[in-house]
Every structure is written in C-alpha cells, then in structure tokens.
Amino acid sequence: MKRIAGMILLAFGLTGILWADSTLSINGAGATFPYPMYSKWFDEYHKKNPNLQINYQSIGSGGGIKQLTEGTVDFGASDLPMNDDQLKAYQEKHSIGILHFPTVLGAVVPTYNIPGVDAALNFTPEALAGIFLGKITKWNDPAMADANKGVKLPAQDIIVVHRAEASGTTFIWTDYLSKISDEWKNTVGAGPAPKWPVGLGGKGNEGVTGTVKNTPNSIGYVELIYAESNKIPYGTVKNASGVFVKPSLAAVSAAAAGAAKAMPDDFRVSITNAPGKDSYPISSFTWLLIPEKFSDAAKRDAIKGFVRWMLADGQNYAEGLSYAKLPKEVVAKEIKAIDKIQ
Amino acid sequence: MATTSKTVPGASPIPGARSFLSRLREGDEIARMITFLFAASVVLVTLLLVFELWRGSALPRHKFGFAFFRTSVWDPIFDQFGALPFIYGTLVTSITALLIAVPLGIGAAIFLAELAPARLSDTLEFFIDLLAAVPSVIYGLLGVFIVIPLMRLYIQPALKSTLGFLPLFQGPAYGVGFLTAGIVLAIMVIPYIISVSREVLLSVPRDQREAALSLGSTHWESTWKVVVPFARTGIMGSIFLALARALGETMAVTMVIGNTPIISASLFSPGYSIAAVIANEFTEATGDLYLQSLIELGLVLFLLTFILNGLARLLILVTSKRGSETALA
Amino acid sequence: MSARLRWRKFVSGFMLTMTGVCALVAVSVLCFILGYLVFHGGTSIGWNFFTKLPAPVGETGGGMANAILGSAKLLFLASLFGVPIGFFGAIYLAEFSGSTVAFIVRYAADLLNGVPSIVIGIFAYSMVVLPFKHFSTLAGGFALGLMMIPITLRSTEEFLRSVPNALREGAMALGASKWKTIATVIVPTAYRGILTAVLLAFARVAGETAPLLFTAFGNRFWSHRWNEPTASLPVMIFTYAISPYDDWHRQAWAAGLVLLGLILAINIVARAILSRGSAVPRS
C-alpha cells in the first residue's frame, strides 16, 4: 500500500516537473471593473494562441499597481491612472517607466435593492453625495423623493455598500463626488481607499454586487455589467448639463468624446462629470499598465501581440459585455504607442 | 534516550568512550547530525518568522509606538494607521463566540464524560473531532448562504424586538456583523472545548465522584460541585485554546463580518478583525508604512495567540497532573 | 422523600438532560453542515466540474479542474517540505537529543503551530514570493508545509516514544547500531501512528485558504510550472462564494463538498489506522 502511494506521488511529481513545457504564462493583476471583459479576452486569445496563457487575477486596482511595482506580476490593470508618486516609485525600483493603455470605457452605476422598487431611480449629484456622506439616511428623503415623483420610496434606512479594498472603481466614484460636492471633496476626498463615513465593505465589484443583491434597502456603486448580469436595478444620474442620463454605451461614449480629441500622450485622463447633454457623468477609461521594457523577449512579443489584437478584434467583444468601445482616435494613438514597449 | 547509545556492543567498557570515528562508521553520528539538522531547522524557521514579523513592522513601530493600539483611524490615503478597530473586532467576535460556545461545549462535555455510555461517548466524540476538521472556508460558505440570511430575516429582528433596549442589539439588521461572526466562530470552536474538556473530565479520579455520591449528593451535584471544579483548570485551558483559534480565524470571519473598520457598541454593526483586514488589504498595500502596519497587526495577532496557547497548555498540563497525583494518593 | 430532595433530584435530572441537549446540538450542527453541503454540492457536481477550466466571468459552465490539480500540487509540495522535517526532527527528539534541546525544539514547534495561518501567508510572501518575484505554487507549498511541520513533529515524537524500551534494547543486544534500530525496529513499530499523524496534518492544511491568498495567488488556466501561480480549491470556494453569480455559487458548493469529503475521508482513514491497534501493547 505504501509502495503504491509512493509511486502515485512520484508520478504526480514527475508529471508536474516534466509538464513545464512550451506554454508561455503571463501573469497580470488589478482592477475588478473590467474583469468580465478581460476574462473574456484572455480566454478568447488563449483559444487563438494555445501556447500562451494570460492569467489575470482581479484583486482591485490598488493591488494591481502594488504587485506591478513589486514585480510579482508582468502587467497590471487599473481604473485609476498611476499618479506621479507611484510612477516615480516604479521608476526608482525598476529603472524603467510604465505605459498606460486604455482598453475599454465603462460606467460606474448606482445600484440598489429596494423591495418593491424595480424602476430606475433618478439620482441628483446632491442626493448621491448626501447618501454616501451619511447625511441622507432614509430612502424617502426629499432629495430622493423630489427627483422620483411617482415612485413609492419606503421610509427605510439606506444601507450604503462600498469597496473594502483599494479600488479604481472607488476612485472613479469619489472623483465624481469630489467634483460635484465640495463637502465630499473636503471631508473625504477622491482616492482608491478613502475613509468612508458610512457603509459596509464588499470585496471587489463582485463583493459589492453580491452584498447589494442580498441586502434589502442597500445602495452600492458597481461597473455597469455587474448590475446588468445580476439583474439588479440601477439608476440614472443627472449630468453637468442637468439631464438625467441612464448609463449606457452611447452615454459613456458621449462622455469620452471630448477626451478622445484631447488625449494626452500618456493616456492618463479623467472623464467624470464630462460636459455634453448625452454624457453619463460617472464614466471612465480603464487601463492596462505595461512596463516599458521586458527582459524576456517572448513575453514582450506576446503582450504586444495581445494589445494589438485587443485594439482590433478585441474591441468587438466590448459591447456584448456592456463596455463601450474605445474612440477611434484613441485606438489610433495607442497603436502607435505599442512600439514604445521594448 | 541519549544514554542508551553508550551501551551499544562494540563499545569500550568505559561508558562514553567510543571514539568519534567508530560512531561515525556505525552511522550513528551521521544519523544524529542529520536528524539534528532537521530538528534545528524547525527552531530556525520559527525564529526567522518572528524576526521577519518584527523587522517587517519597524516603520509603524517607530512612527506610532504604542499609540498604534489606541488610535482608531485607518486611513491609507493620509498614512494614518490605528489598530483599535481591528483589535476591538477581533476581541468582540471571539468573546461573543466563547459566550455561546462555552456553555454549550462544557454541557456537551459533561454529557459525554459523565452520562453517556462509553461507546456512545466515543462515537459522538468521533463526530465532534470531524467537526473540528472542517476547514474555515466551508464555515464561511455556510455563513454567507445560511447564517447571514437567518440573521437578517429572523434572528436580528427578533433580538431587536425583545432586547432592543440594550445598546448591544440596536441598529439596522444588515445580516453581517459582529454577532454573525461570533456565531460562526462559536460553531468552529465548540469541538475544541468539547474534546479537551471531555478528556480532563474523564481524567478526574473516580473516588472524587464516589465520595460526593456517598455523601448523598445527586448525580448533577456531584458533577457540578465536585468533578467540574476539580477539572476547572483544564477546562479553562480548553477555553484558552478555543479563544486562540477564534482570534486567528480569517476566512470565515471576513466572509460574514462586513469588513468595515468601526467600533460600535452594537453587535449588529459590521466590523473588522485583524486577520480579515490583512487578508483583504495585504496584496494592495501601496507604500511601506501601509504594508508594515498590516505586518504589525500580524505581529500583534501572533503575540496574542502565542500567549493564549501557552497558558492553555500550562493549564491543561496542571489539571492532568493533579488528576494523576490525587488518584495515586 | 422531602420536598428539598425532590427539588434536587429534579434539578439533577433537568441539568443532565440539558447536557444531553448540548451534545445533541453540537453533533447535529455537523450533520446539518454535511447534509447541506451534500444537498447543494451534490446537485452541482458533474463531469464538467472535474474536467473543465473556469469559464469567463458571467458565463455558465466551466469547472474547477485546474483548482483540483492545483490543490494536489500544493499538498504534494507541502508534504515534501513539511513531513521530512517533522519526521526526522521527531526522530532526533525521541532518540538522540538531550532534554534542553528537546524543550527548545518542542517549544518552537508549538509556537509555529499557534501562528495564525494568515501570518504564515505573510511570512511565505516575504520569503518566497518577493525574492523570486513570482506568485507561485512553490510559495503556497512552502506556507502549507510550514503548517504541517508542528503536527507531524509532535505526533511522530509521541508515537516513537511510545515504542517500549524492550524493543530498543533487544535490537541493540543483537548488535544493531542506533540508526539501524531506528530504521528497522522503532519506526516500523510506530508506523501506524506516524502515518496517522501525517494524514491528519495533510487533512488540516488541505482546507487552508488564508496562506494561499498571497502565495499561490490564483490562476484561470492550468498552472504549468512550479514557479507559476495556481488555482486551489479553498481559494476558488472563497472567490466564488462572495461573488454575485449564481453559477459560481453552485460551483462553490460543489467544491466545498469535494474538499470536505476529502478531508473527512482522510480523517476517518487516519483514525481507523490508529484504532486497529499498535503492533505491540503500549505499556
């Protein structure tokens, strides 16, 4: 019996060792915002290139930036561009820089679970700021009721759900709140992991969606696809032009239109509260963070190949998953930027 | 054990005088050295772990000192880190767990040790040991899909309507929170209390019980007033063991506690524990102070469990010794 | 019978019944856990679960084949690392060492045993992940192996010590050197207990999740090298359970059933081995 067990173990071990074959594995980590998109992309790309595996773990934008800086992953992904301090830290550690490549556009939507309310509620900027500041505590508060005449809102406590970890989605949300609320800007501020005045923490977009889905009278903020695929209602937000816009691909693309024309070379830009009457105010690009130089030529070529594919065929998968395609101008600019990866 | 090597045949008549070379040739010295290396590696790796924890938390130790334990602000953006909410959460959930698990556990142990016939006792103990083997993440799974809805729909509202005047049971019924985590932890630590308490109760010498019964006490009185106090220190040991397990629990807690660093008198409130915050934030802690503050939390947790485990073993040892000494007397 | 005595007898009967209730509650929790897992997990286990890789997020179908293999590889590494150290260290403690060294080693093992698993994860991250600049199966195996060491060490030592001296002296009287005695007499005698110890240590770490979070990390595909991240059953259960997707929830239940089934099976086998009795009466 012992001998058989020993041989099985040996067989396992040998298989594992000998199986270190020609498959190239690339590891990435980061944002949960585009995770449904990326997991589809990497799956499809693997089908086209069976010898290449791109393993992406969604641990949040903060985690992506951190592990990229530590060098434990080959690329990162984030919904907030790395700020100058983080870029400098990376530069100091690795003597090269990071290139940002926008991949898709998405919307962060206010999603809620109010028993008996299926309609898309209208949220004013003041209402959103008030709820997340903890100032507006009941669903039937005038700030909500006035914008939603015709919907019977209950006199129940609002249960706020936010992200438990450092998140680019949080950054997009708080970036927007800081732009429309001075009180938010001065007390909490914009960032991936602010000190939330109220609320429960969920891990990843997935965790927030799950918590909202299971908690009556709750409200959270998640990327559009998470609310859609889990069939939980999400609301409209009043944009800078005073129009209540429902989050949609067209609205997100409208928000990006201005930025597309004035895209900086390093692709770091924020499009929250964008002008235009069709724009959805809480939209954002999301980026792949790729080092400028790769010591492993095979990895470098694999990543460059993927980015090229992503900008062409890959974009066709976006709308099926409720992400907006990149504007043409941005795509053209990125194709040129691929050559910067050495 | 070490002395028997000197009586190996082929030794010189003078004990200990076998030459190094002859021991070497016999292979004993090599065996001794090799096994020593393995044993020493255990010590080395443990020392290395403690050292890494200490070194890895140098920044916050110097910057915050003991204020780390008094501050409740955890703000990665402004580099302010205080451990109080996590220590609070860890302690509250563990104590809640004990409040539930200790009476149930000791009761069950009494049943198994005093009342149940030997075969039933052994079979039940077998099942209880299996309960101890269930991994934490499965408790978490059950917590998320069974306990949380139960709490939100039935238990929390029921507690609120009956005991809602106490600050302990106020606030909205989220489903997650300190109480939920406490309940899940209670289920996890009951097996430890039961199996250790049962053993120490069984080790109480028969004459103690019989003396009490011969003086006219009822079965319960002899158990509760004589046997249990005799095994008191061992039972305390089992409670410390259970506490140590509860403090270090990560997965089950992070799935049901709500992951919010706040300190609240209400058990319905969401909270955070040391292990849970490390699990959630470690991979993304940008900046050395942030990461090292998490490591310092790990060090704190380690010290807590270390002290408790040590006390537990001491107490259990004392009881079994007392048991055997008194029996011989 | 006086009223007081009747009362005391009543209290006695009542309290003792309560203790029975406590025992019943404790045991029924286990039965409930098992039953629930079997019910929910059983309906989700299928051929797909064991053979397919995870599907893209939000799509149904897909399985946990890579997580099953990943867990197997991690446990293999953990045993490779932890069992020899525990085993040979225990031989040292039982056969060779003096009491001071023995005390230090046992103390260190107890210390290591008490370290919360998340802290072991931190240690493995700084020892293996950072220097190699890779999340890897190696790092995960290292973390789990560390957790196997104390259990293996203490139990093996106890079983070695329980071998009666008569056997030792008999072997030596026949001219065997110390190491030969150990290898041919002592270890085979204690083998059942040692095997039990190893199996229990194995079952203990099979379900560990926290140390794998930042060592083995996770992988949507097969992990091809020891230096690559790998999926594992416990981490998949965690990730899927907190997600909002119903299909993932079903898979989490299935994985939970498989994992728990494995652990309970090992526990039962280990205890069965032990209770078959040792080869020699323990005196």
Image (cartoon, grey):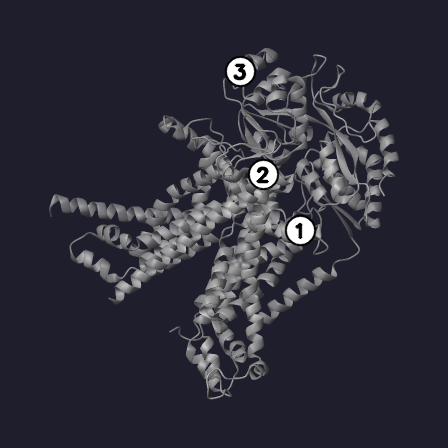
The reply to whether residue B191 is visible in this rendering is: no
Q: Which residue is disc 2 drawn over?
A: C242
Tell me the quarter of the picture where residue A310 sits.
top right
Task: Determine the chain carrying the residue at label 1.
Answer: C
Residue shown at 47% from the left, 29% from the top: B173
User: Label 2 crowding class (10 Å Cα cut-off): few <14, some 14-19, many 20+?
Assistant: many
Badges 1 and 3, same chain: no
Q: Residue at x 68, y 19 (%)?
A: A179
Q: Which residue is mark 3?
A: A140
Distance, label 1 to label 2, CA atoms, is 26 Å
Residue type at mark 2?
Ile
Q: Is residue C153 visible?
A: yes
Residue drawn 72% across the image and 36% down it: A86
B82 to A131, vertically: above or below: below
Question: Residue A223's spot in the image, x, y percent?
Answer: 67, 29
Identify the disc placed on residue B255: none
- Marks 1 and 3 sit apart, C-alpha to C-alpha, by 51 Å
Under circle 3, the secondary element is loop
Q: Viewer-proximal residue, C99 or C200?
A: C99
Residue closer to the observer: B131 or A76: A76
Front of the two marks 1 and 3: 1
Q: Amino acid at mark 3?
A: Asn
Tell me the crowding category of disc 1: few under 14, some 14 to 19, or many 20 or more residues within 10 angstroms, Cα based. Answer: many
Where is residue A202? Give x, y as percent.
Answer: 58, 34
Q: Residue at x 60, y 18 (%)?
A: A183
- Is C197 placed above or below A106 here? below
Please identify the quadrant where the C terminus of chain B is shown. Answer: bottom left
Q: Earlier in the sequence, mark 1 or mark 2?
A: 1
- Left or right: residue A28 compared with residue C147: right
Q: Which residue is mark 1?
A: C129
